[in-house]
Image (cartoon, rainbow, N blue to C red):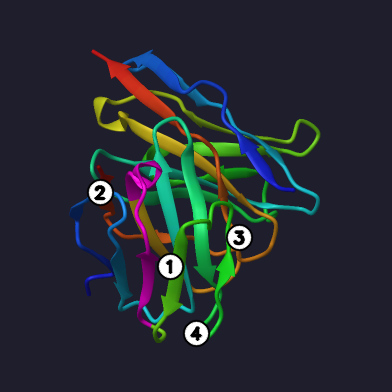
Amino acid sequence: NAGVTQTPKFQVLKTGQSMTLQCAQDMNHNSMYWYRQDPGMGLRLIYYSASEGTTDKGEVPNGYNVSRLNKREFSLRLESAAPSQTSVYFCATTTGANEKLFFGSGTQLSVL
Amino acid sequence: AQSVTQLGSHVSVSEGALVLLRCNYSSSVPPYLFWYVQYPNQGLQLLLKYTSAATLVKGINGFEAEFKKSETSFHLTKPSAHMSDAAEYFCAVTPRTYKYIFGTGTRLKVLA
């Protein structure tokens, strides 16, 4: 079992480029999340999907879109990358509300 | 709105000394509270979780936390620090919904 798999692990973009971060889980979890981690700011919730077919905004959704492709996959898209989106992105999953989160190993994104 | 405040972005302790990492929360409903640990270049792992069953919660690696409603606190402690405890620690709250809000983190340094 791989758990929560994020691809790619590293990415460098130029301002204005687009890209999609992929997250897949083999834990049969219902809920999936995207967080960004910045120094001194902790983890901030971008979007989440409580269950297949639903998505909701978190604290910092501007500049991002998400797709819950199926129960296993939850992707995060940057349509026009900006330097302010330089960050480490984490995908997380859980069985349901109030349960512990399982995290992927992260994607380090630099936007020049 | 729910929030988490972690006092002290950096804490240093000597090996064998008490570890105390502070977390205060704000929640309009009885919360679920979590402590996570992050080792370098990894995702977050659950240390312990408060669910209202008991105010003193024991977690992995000898850590424990006490829920104090009157002080809106959920501080993390360990009687004797080990070198392997050096990491970043995050407190998180969920107000019994699918949203998990994280604090800004405390980086623990253990001195030999």
The one of B97 and A100 positioned closer to us in this rendering:
B97
To which residue does mark 1 refer? Answer: A93
Label disc, if present, on residue A108 of the rendered structure: 2
Comes first in the chain, label 2 or label 4? 4
Q: Residues within 10 Å of mark 2 (few under 14, many from 20)?
A: some
The one of B106 and B81 positioned closer to us in this rendering:
B106
- Left or right placement of residue B18 versus residue A83 in this view: right
**Magenta segment:** A72-88
To which residue does mark 3 refer? Answer: B99
Label 3 residue SS: loop
Q: Chain of mark 2?
A: A
- Circle 2: residue type: Gln
Label 2 residue SS: strand
Could you tell me how far apart the alpha carbons at marks 2 and 1 are, in whole angstroms? 19 Å
- Decide: is A93 above or below B76: below
Same chain? Circles 2 and 1 = yes
